[in-house]
Amino acid sequence: MPFEDEVRPVRLSAWSPAWESEFEELAAQIRGALGGVAAAIQHIGSTSVRGLSAKDVIDIQVLVGELDDPRIGRAFESLGFRKRPEPWNQADSFGGVSFPKAVYAPPAGARAANIHVRPESSDGARYALLFRDYLRADSQARTTWADLKAHIASAIPDLAPYGQIKAAALPLLMRGAERWAAETNWKPWPMASVPE
């Protein structure tokens, strides 16, 4: 569940160019605290896809060598960020296999965000980048995903069931993404030409 200060009905906003600069501001703050611990800091999720409606919450992926490096927790604590305690914020699951991660929220009252910390070799990291890049590249998939999210949000504005229904539909979207990845020879970072 979100922290008490984050509880509000699901509301989707039209894509905003401000999300890119807000990502850059948060990324600079995180980079400053983590120093060389972060291999990459990437804008992910719906706010990273131009033209896609989204909850006004910036999703950031921080790739690290070792998830249990104690410098990671200390760095986020120094910024006032809070580690999300829920089981689904401690692992990604695909095809019955779990991949560890950690998710942090900013301090109460700060710009809404989810900071996903994953090992750089994680399938979870690949999945997040594939979701983003596929929706950036395929306008039909982007429109279909936006329409689905709008229908769910209008019927169920509570965050937990909204997220559960969206998560149940995500494998359908990602099947198309995997086909696209194979057809285009897409590679995630660090194999991609330009990491963020």
Image: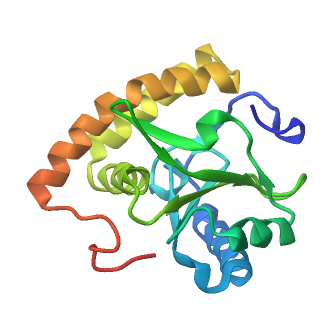
Figure quadrant of residue 81: bottom right
Q: Nearer the viewer, residue 29 or 149?
A: 29
Q: Residue 132: x, y in percent?
A: 40, 54
Viewer-proximal residue, 21 or 51? 21
Pick the residue in front: 39 or 154.
Answer: 39
Residue 98 visible, this angle: yes
**Residue at x 46% of width, y 75% of height:** 196
> Which image quadrant: the N terminus?
top right
Residue at position x 68%, y 33% from top? 11
Residue 13 visible? The answer is no
Identified at 33% across, 53% down, the residue is 130
Residue 108: x and y, percent?
A: 90, 52
Looking at the picture, tell me which residue is in the foreground, 104 or 178. Answer: 104
Q: Residue furthest left?
A: 183
* Left or right of 1 on screen, residue 116: left
Name the quadrant containing residue 32: bottom right
Is residue 155 placed above or below 164 in the rendered structure?
above
**Left or right: 180 as drawn, with respect to 56:** left
Quadrant in the rendering for residue 175: top left
Q: Is 9 left or right of 5, judged from the image as shown?
A: left
Q: Residue 61: x and y, percent?
A: 54, 61
Number of numbered discs overlaid on the protein picture: 0
Colouring chosen for the image of the structure = rainbow
List x then y, in percent, for residue 143. 36, 38
Q: Residue at x 74, y 41 (%)?
A: 85
User: Which residue lies most toward the top here?
Assistant: 155
Q: Is residue 132 left or right of residue 32?
A: left
